[in-house]
Structures are given as structure tokens and as C-alpha cells.
Image (cartoon, coloured by chain):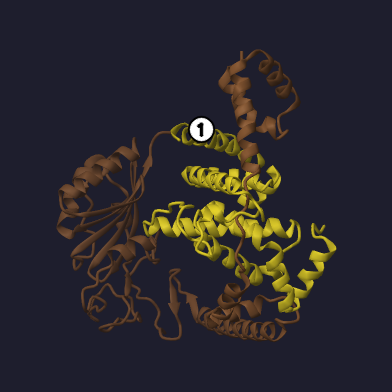
Amino acid sequence: MSNLTDDEAQILARIRAGDGEAFGQLVHRHQQMVFAVALRMVGDFHDAEDVAQDVFVRASRAIGAFRQEAKLSTWLVAITMNLCRNRRRWWSRHRRVIAASLDEPAGPNAEPLGDTVSDPSPSPAQSAQASERQRVVQGALQQLEPGAREMVVLRDLHGYTYEEIARMVRCPVGTVKSRLSRARMQMRALLHSETVSE
Amino acid sequence: MTSCSAYRAWLSPYVDGRLEAAQRLHLETHLTGCSGCHEALASLQQMLATLRALETPAAPDLLPGIRRKLAAAPWWRVVIERVTAPWPQSLPWHGLAMATTALLVIMVARNSMVDRSFQAEKAGRLQHDDRGLLQDRSSVGVAPSAGFGSGGARANASRPSDDLGKAFRSDTPGSGEFPASSPSLLEGERVGVGGAPMLERTLEREAGLEGELGHLAGADAEVKPSQTIQGNTAVLELRWVVPDPTATATRIVEWIHAHEGLVVATTPTRLSIRLPHAMLPVFLQQWAPGGSVLPAVVEPTASWITLSLDLVSSQP
């Protein structure tokens, strides 16, 4: 049974037939979501961009094996989580400390990441507030251990169901439930301590 | 009675609507009367609201970078992608893979058939002689010597257990050679010549020898009258019945180590022991059930003895 919309099914068929333009459409449709997940997981703009590109490179190679049992977006996010884990393992072997820095100019226009918001016309106060919120949340996320971070990012930031999360991270639904519960408690404690210290 | 910490563990699935009905009722009842848990719930809901309202940073245009990475793929990856690509892109590559696989299968089958026909031919040449020993009729055409009796003492013509032979086989140069004048050689046996595979000689016991071998003073001894020669090492298979095989094996191992022999326990009660020839009487006097000493039945030219010792329990 296919979980794809008609439009997605059509794009998929065209990609499998070698249609490069269809692949471009796929990228444009899903790059925001893939990039956002990657950014929350790795905490660095350029790393997230690199991961997101790798997601689509891998997807293009594995598109023939995609069985359409899950939504296309779910499949892409699962690839994203895998690549984030691989990257984390690679960096831990090479002893790099991943530090989230929303204050450093890292975006394409050399703006601090905290200022890169999707709201087209925020007031200065709102922008500042949003930046600060981004900084605090991202900082707290990076302090969570990776398994807990996955839960918060997928459930609380991107709204995936327990079942979808279980499929993406390849664990039982019960494990998702307990991990998410613990992750939220830790997140609450981190955000509370950040608020208190300000 | 459920504690507040247990109730607070339910708050996360509760806000997601994933709590079981009975637990939900229980929690809601508790929340009405516990301000601490009520505050914890409110705090959790506020945090979730903050997270869900978080703006998502705008993604850069990923397509140029993706195309660059796809174009930079190494040749082997291109091949893999072509082979695993969906039909019909992969057709020529699948054809190539199938042809290669078919060729390999044919080669393996052919080699297997050649090997089988060789084995069959060899089996056809090998026949049992009057004493039940295998002889290669393609090279041996002489009947066994009449000097050897058969009786009930049938020497074990087969190689001892592989681990034994391989572990303790002598690799002394020229050990495969035996003097042609040795009276123990069966006529027609081939003698290895420098570098040739090790020759196994089978010694036949003279009439009555089985009695000596098999009958030791002491009620529980049992010796399998089996011996082969490999190079300058005699290989002797023994089977002793003892009250406690495992404990006996352990003590024997300790004794062997103390006397600079070599021992390998293939099982807790089966030992493979290598000793200098001169130590054999001492070993047997120390350990053989009943304390008896075997007569010098071992080939005198052997400088080493390999014992395959099997200890069995006398307990029912």
C-alpha cells in the first residue's frame, strides 16, 4: 500500500526513469524540512547544509529501493537521522567538540543563525526575541544526549507521531514513549536553568 | 499508592494523548488534588508550546551542492548505482552481471566434476586387503607378509585423531624415510623420500601380543591396542577406566607440565600427551590404573611418544 500522494508518486516514477528535473522538484519540496532537522541535530549551519545535501545524494541512489510504505518525507528524515548519527560518530572519533553557536555569523549572508527566521516581517523586538529563543533552545538541545535529542526534534519540533519516529530511529514505540518522556524532563530542566541564569 | 514521581512520568504521554484510559483517569484525579504535579504539567505544556512555536531557519538552496556531489562520485560507485538502478536503466549491467555469474558457476561446477571423477577413480583403485587394510592397488601388488598374525589384535590402520596428528607430527627433515630393511614394514608400502608426505606405518602385533597389551594388573585398565608411527613419533591410543576421569585428567595435566611434556586437553577427559620415549614407563607407572607398566611395545626407533588418552568413568 502506498503512502504517497498522486503527485509524489508521479515525481518518484519520473526520478526512477532518470528525470533530473523531477529530482530537482523533490529537493525543492523537502529541503527545508531536511535542513531543519539536520540543523537541530548537528547544531551548525554548514554541517547541517552538508548533511542535507548528503541526504538527497543518498536518496537519489536509493530511490529505486524506496518501497513507498512510508511517506517520502518520513523516508528522507530517516536518512537525515542516520547521517547525523554517522557524522556524530565520525566527529567523536576525531575528537571534535560540536558547539552550537547561534551568535556567530554562519548563514549564507553572514548573519547570525539566530536571525535567520522564516517570518518575513518581524519587528525588531520580535526578531530579537526569536533569536534569543533559538539560541536558548538550540543550546539546550545540544546538551541532550543524541538519543534524547532525536526524540525532541522529531516529536516536539517537527510533530512526527510515535509510530513514525519508531520507524525512523528503528526502535519500538514503547521505547520512543519512554525516551521522549525522559528527554522532555531533561529539556525542561535545561531550559529552566537557562531562564534562571539570565 | 502511586507516588508523584510516577505520576510525573505519565505527563509526557498524557500531553500526547498516548496514556492508557485507566492511567489517564488516575492521573487526572491526582492532578486535581496535587498542586506540585499540576505545576509540572503546566510547565511541560508551556515548554512544548515554546518548542512548537520555534521558527525554522531558512534552508539554503541545496541543489547545486547535491549535483556537485553526484557528479564527483567515484567510478565504482557509478557501477554500483548502474547495477542497482531500476529497470530498464540497469539492463545492460544486469546482463553483464548475469553473464559473469554464469561463467563462475560453470567454472566451479567443472572443477567439482573433475575432482569427483578423480576421487572416484582413486576409490576404484583402493581395495581392502586380507587384513582389512586399505591398499592402493595401483602401486602395490604384493600380498602382506605371512609373518604377521591377525588374531583378534587388529592394529588400527587409520590415522589417530586429526588434532593429535597435526599437533604433534614431527617435522624433522627426512622423517618420512624408513629403512627399507626394517622388518616392521609391510611389503609393498611406499617409503617417503625427502620432502614427500609423511609415511604412516602400521605395526601388526604378533600373536599373543594383544594379550599383553590388553591385560594389565588391575581390574579397571583397558588399553586399546592401537599404535601408529609418524616419523620418529609413536602414537599410542589408550583408554583407561577410572573412578573420576575429570580429576584424573587434571592431575595428569599437572604432572605432564611438571615433567616438561606437552599436553592438550581436547575434552575434559581426553588428553593428547607428547612425551619423550624414555618417560613413557615412568608415566605409565605413575598413572596407569593398577600401576602396571606396559611392555616395550612401542617402536624402539621412536624418540617421542604421543598418547591419545581417553579417560572413562567406572561409575555406573
Vertical side of A2 occupied by B140: above or below: below
The residue located at (34%, 36%) in the rendering is: B244
Residue at horizontal 43 percent and vertical 69 percent from the top: B131
Q: Give percent across and percent down for residue B310.
A: 35, 49
Q: Residue B67 location in percent, x, y?
A: 61, 77
- Quadrant location of the N terminus of chain B in the rendered image: top right
Instruction: Examine the rendering and report whether any part of residue B275 can be seen.
Output: yes
Left or right: residue B82 compared with residue B143: right
Query: So how many labels did they put on this image?
Result: 1
In the displayed structure, does residue A87 sit left or right of residue A122? left
Position of residue B54 relative to residue B304, above or below, is above
Chain that is coloured yellow in the picture: A
Q: Counting other residues with Cα less than 10 Å from the Cα at mark 1, is it few (<14), some (14-19), or many (20 or more)?
A: some
Q: Residue at x 27, y 77 (%)?
A: B176
Q: Is residue B211 above or below residue A25?
A: above
Residue type indicated by callout 1: His
Q: Position of residue B231 (x, y in %)?
A: 25, 71
On screen, residue B138 above or below A11 = below
Helix, strand or loop at disc 1?
helix
Is residue B67 rendered to the left or right of residue B250? Answer: right
Front residue of B149/A39: it is A39
Q: Which quadrant would residue B4 be assigned to in this image?
A: top right
Residue occupied by mark 1: A192
**Residue A24, position in %: x, y?**
70, 73
Which image quadrant: the C terminus of chain B? top left
Which chain is in brown here? B
**Residue A65 seen by the camera:** no
Front one among B178 and B297: B178
| Residue B152 appears left or right of B258 | right
Q: Nearer the viewer, residue A13 or A32?
A: A32
